[in-house]
Amino acid sequence: MSNPDFSDIPGTYVFDGDRAVQGRHLNRFCMSLMSPANRARFKAGQRTYLDEWPMSEAQKQAVIARDFEALLELGGNIFFVLKLAALDGRPTQSVAASFSGQSTQEYAAMMRSGGRRPEGLRSISGGF
């Protein structure tokens, strides 16, 4: 398990050394999407392109499903994972909205009104 100081805060995935090792190939895949040729290859056959990378099956499925929270949990670095969102023409705000279980419009309205209240968003154990 990654950083135990934050492990009981729901939805918090600290990108530390353990996650960097876990997500090495996932993040390299995401960075490969900076190349127009690689983007074209990925779009032409997602699974075929993913199978060229020694990622776990869970990582590959999270890519295919565009499950951004799972990608972070499985070692993805948000800055690299956003390359995948950009490939789909998704703005960063839509990815952030997906973490909060809201539509992009709901998320934008929440942020304009001051953001989400912190009540209930602390650690499971109540220590934070």
Image (tube, helix red, strand yellow):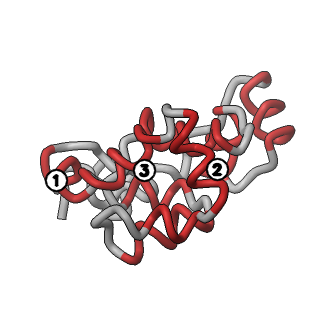
Residue at position x 41%, y 53% in the image: 72
Q: Is 82 placed above or below 71 here?
A: above
The three-letter code of the residue at mark 2 reads Ser
User: Label 1's element?
Assistant: helix
- Gap between marks 2 and 3, in whole Å? 14 Å
Observer-nearest of 11 and 124: 11
Observer-nearest of 119 and 34: 34
- Gap between marks 1 and 2, in whole Å? 26 Å
In this rendering, which labeled residue sits more in front, label 1 or label 3?
A: 1
Query: Which quarter shows the N terminus?
Result: bottom left
- Gap between marks 1 and 3, in whole Å? 27 Å
Residue 46, x across and y down, in percent: 58, 64
The three-letter code of the residue at mark 1 reads Val
Q: Point out the tag, 1 or 3, that comes first from the N-terminus.
A: 1
The three-letter code of the residue at mark 3 reads Arg
User: Label 2's element?
Assistant: helix
Q: Which residue is mark 3?
A: 122
Q: Point out the tag, 2 or 3, that comes first from the N-terminus.
A: 2
Q: Which residue is mark 1?
A: 21
Residue 95, x across and y down, in percent: 64, 43
Residue at position x 59%, y 66% in the image: 64
In this rendering, which labeled residue sits more in front, label 1 or label 2?
A: 1
Q: Do callouts 2 and 3 mark residues in contact (Cβ within 8 Å)? A: no
Report crowding for label 3: few under 14, some 14 to 19, many 20 or more residues within 10 A (C-alpha): few
Q: Do callouts 1 and 3 mark residues in contact (Cβ within 8 Å)? A: no
Report crowding for label 2: few under 14, some 14 to 19, many 20 or more residues within 10 A (C-alpha): some
Residue at position x 55%, y 46% in the image: 119
Q: Which residue is mark 2?
A: 100
Observer-nearest of 1 and 57: 57
Report crowding for label 1: few under 14, some 14 to 19, many 20 or more residues within 10 A (C-alpha): some
Residue 92, x across and y down, in percent: 64, 33
Residue at position x 58%, y 43% in the image: 39
